[in-house]
Image: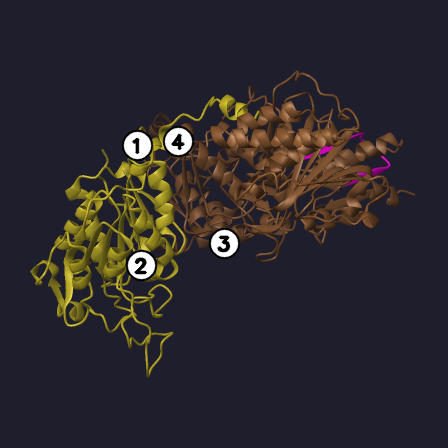
Amino acid sequence: MANDVNLAYSSTWCPGCGNFGIFNALKKAFADAGLDLEATVLVTGIGCAGKIAQYLNTYRIETLHGRTLPVATGVKLANHRLTVIAEGGDGDGMGIGMGHFIHTARRNLDIAYFIHNNQIYGLTKGQSSPTSDLGAVTKFTPPPLGNVERPINIVQTAISAGATFVARAFTGDIPQLAGLMIEAIRHPGFAVVDILQPCVSFNHLNTYQWYRQRITPVADLPGYDIADREKALSLASLWGDKIPLGVFYQETRPTFADSLPQLAGPPLAARPVDDISIAGLMAEMA
Amino acid sequence: MAKNSYICQFGGEAGYGVMSAGIMVAKAAGRHGLWAFIANEYPSLIKGGLNTCLVRLSDKPLTAYEERLDFLGVLSQPGLEQNYAKLKEGAILLYDADAVKADPARLPTGVQAFPVKLMQSVTGDAAKVMANSAMLGAFCALTGFPVDLIAAVMRDEFTQPQIQARNLALLQEAYEKVSAAGGAAGEFPLPFAENDQAKMLLTGNDAICMGAVKAGCKFAAGYPMTPGSGILTYLADHAAEYGLVFKQSEDEIAAMNMLIGAGFAGVRAIGATSGGGFSLMVEALGFAGQAEVPVVMVEAQRGGPSTGLPTRTAQGDLNFVVSASQGEFPRFVIAPGDIEECFFEAFRVFNLAEQFQVPCILLSDKYLADSAATTPFFDDSGLTVNRGKLADENWLAANQPYARYRQTDDGVSWRAVPGQKGGRHIATSYTHGEDGFYSSGHHEYAGDEPDITAAGLDKLFRKVPAMLAALPAIELHGPEVADITVVGWGSTKGAILEALALAAAEGLTANFLQVRCLSPFPAAAVEAVLGKARRTLLIEGNKTGQLGLMIRANTGYKVDHSYLKYDSRPFVPSVIFARMKEVLP
C-alpha cells in the first residue's frame, strides 16, 4: 500500500493562501485514514484550487474548468473500488459547474467533493464568484454597488439537491478540516465539504480574521440534528454574524452504483474485453 | 446490384405504426430469401404529422434507397399528397377510405387505387395504432405478398397474447376482405425462398452498438439527441446483460467528461449524439486530445445549423468535427459508409482509441443511423482486441520511474490506470511535460516552457503516420481507371455504388473514391487516386462541398463537378447516375 504523498514540486500559491491549509489537511486526512494512494483518484478542476492535484502523489486527473464531477463520475463508475475525491473552487463548482453539482448530488455517487470556497475568482485575478457576498467589490463588480447577486449557499444547495453528507470547514483549522475530510471520504455517498478559504491577494473582505470572528460549531446551535433535513437546512441558512461549521446533515441512501446489478461484481475496469460473444445480439435481430 | 426491386411505402400520422408495418414486411421478406432496405422519414413530434416507412425489397442485397413506388399505403391525406409523383406507372395505391381522398387526375397512368376502410375495422383508441395491421392485410391481398409470412413475424413482434391475437385477426380480416373484392393481380413480383444464410434486420445505430459490445465497451454516457439516441437506447437495454453501465447525463458536456473519466480509469467508453450535442462536447474533446485519453464518440449528423432539422439527414458537420476544439491535436474521424461498416469500424475504433490514445469520432448521419437493411450475420471471428500500450503492474515495476507522457518514437506513451501499483501520475488538460506537470505552473519549468510546449505537440503529431496506416483510410470501388470518378464519404456509399452499377449496365466505366478516414486526412492516398482520374464528381450531403474543400486544401486537387444535396433527404442512386451522365462528354 502506497502512502508516500509528497511530490518534489513546489506550489505556486501565494504566500498565506488558504489553499495551503487545505493541502496540509488533505495530506493529514490521507495519512490518518490510511488511504492507499494507488487506489485513490483526485479529480480537480481549473483554478487555484485545482492546482492541488499537482502537489499530491495519488492518481490525479486535472480536468477542465467546472467539469470535476462528471469526470469523477466516469472514474467511479469505471472502477467503483477506487476512492474518488473531487476538488475545485467556488467558481469552478458553483458557477460553470453548477449543473453537474446538482445532478451528482441527486445521483448520490460515492464521491467526496471538497470545495475550496474563497468567494472570489483568484487565478483570473479577482472577479466576483457565485459565492461572493452581497456588496463585495471585485474587478467585475466595481463600486459603488459591488456584487448585487445573492450568493449561493453551498451547504443549503447541497442538502436540497440530495447530497448525503454535507459539512462546512475552515482552512484555518487543519485538524477539524482533516477530520471532516476523512468523514466525507468514508461516507458511502456524495459527500460535500464547503471549505472556507481566504484569498489573500484578491478577497480583502473575507479574511482569516473575518472568518475567525464568525465561525462557530454547528453542533452547539439550538435545534442541531444531523439526521433532520429540515433542521439542517435551517441552520445552513445562517450566514452573517455566525457562520456555522461542522457536519450539517448526513443520511444513508443507496448510491447510484448500488442501483446497478452489473456493478455487484468486479469493477468495469477489471472485466475482460477479449472474445466477447455477440451471437445473442445478432440472433435477436434476425 | 439489384435490378429487380420492389418498393413499397407506408404512411400515416405519427403513432399509427407505419414504421412497424414496414419493419414487419422487411423482416418477413428477409426471412424468406429476399433482401430489404428500410428508410424512415418522420418529423420531430409525438403525434400527428406524417411518418413514412419506405421498404425496398429485392432478390439481391440492397445498399440504398430509391423513391419510385410500386406500392403506396396511406392512412392519412398528407401521406398521399406528397407522393402522387413518386408512384410508378401501374403502381398500387391503398388508402383509408375515410381519412384519405385520392384525386384521380393526379395519379400517374395506370395506377390502381384501392380505398379500403382500414381504420374503421378497429374501434376506439386502438383504431389508429392497429390500422397498420389492417393495412398489411390489404397490402398482402393487393400485392400477392404471402400473408402467412407477415403473420409469422407478427407472432414474434407482439408477445402480449391479447394484442397479438387482435392484430392477427385484423391482418387476416383485411386480407380476406380485399381478396374477396378482387385482390391481387397475381403473385408477388419477387421470388420467396428458403434463406441460405442467417440475416438480421438492423440499423446503422444497431450495428455500431454491436461493434462496441464486441470491442469490450463497458461504459456509455449521453444525453438524448436524435438521431444519436438510438445508440444510447440500445446500450441501456443491453447494459445489464453485457455488464456495461450506461449513464444518462445532465447534458452533453457531462457526457463527454464522464467518458473521459472512464477512459482514464481504463474502461472502453462510448457516447452518441448529433451536431448540437457534439458542439457542447467540444471543449472536452480537446481535453481528451491534450490528456491523451482514449474515448469514442458517435456523431450522427442531422440538418443544421442550430436545432436545424432534428429528424432529417445531412452531412454538414464534417469540417466542424475534424477541426472542433481550440488548439491542435490528432484525432480519428471515421465515416462508416454502410451498416456493415458501422459494425466493423465501431469495433476497430475502440482499438484505435487505445493504440493511439486519441479521441475518436464515428461520423454517421440520420440516414445511416436510422435506415435498416437485411444484413448477413457479421463474421466477427477475426476481430481481436488491441489495447495498445496499456501498462500492467509488471511493466510498471520494470520501468520506474514511470512518466505518463514519456517521449517515444511513435508518440505513444505507456498508460497506467488508477489502482495499479507503480503507475501514479497526473493526467492533465494543461500543456505538459513528460511527467504531466504543466509548463508554466512550476518554478522548476520556468525556463523550459517553449521546449516543453513544442515537444509536447511534436509528440502528439508523431502518431499521425501510424494512425493513417492503421485502417483502410480510403477505398477505391470499381476499376482503377474510369471515365468518371465519384468522390464521397459516409452514408452516400450505398447510393453511389448502385449508381455505378447503373452506369456499368449502360457501358460506362465509373469508379468511386470513398474517403473513410477524414482525420487524419489521407492526403497521399487521395492524391494518388485523383491523379489518375479522368473526370471527378463530388457527392456530398452539404451546401459547401466540405470534402472537396478538404481535398483541395490537402492535395491541391480541385474536383471537376459537384452534386451537393442539402434538402434534408437522402441521395437516390438513379439521380446520382443522371448527374454522372450529365457531366460525361
Report, in whole angstroms, how far the alpha carbon at label 1 lies from the one at label 3: 36 Å
Q: Nearer the viewer, mark 2 or mark 1?
A: 2
Q: Amino acid at mark 3?
A: Leu
**Residue lying farthest bottom?**
A144
Q: Nearer the viewer, mark 4 or mark 3?
A: 4
The residue at the point 49 percent across, 46 percent down is B289
Q: Amino acid at mark 2?
A: Gly
* Mark closer to the chain start, 1 or 3: 3
| Residue B474 within the magenta-colored segment of the rendering | yes
Q: Which residue is mark 1?
A: B421
Answer left or right for B467 relative to B416: right
Indicate the position of residue A120 as horizontal and vertical percent values. Answer: 31, 67
The magenta-colored residue range is B473-486
| Residue A146 within the magenta-colored segment of the rendering | no
Front residue of A53 and B170: B170
Answer left or right for B361 relative to A257: right
**On the image, which quarter does residue A137 sit in?**
bottom left
Q: Which mark is residue B151?
A: none
Q: Which residue is mark 4?
A: B240
Label 4, secondary structure: give it: helix
Tag 1–tag 3 contact (CB < 8 Å): no
Chain letter tied to brown: B
Chain of the residue on which disc 4 is drawn: B
Q: Quadrant of the N terminus of chain B?
A: top right
Q: Which residue is mark 3?
A: B280
The residue at the point 18 percent across, 63 percent down is A234
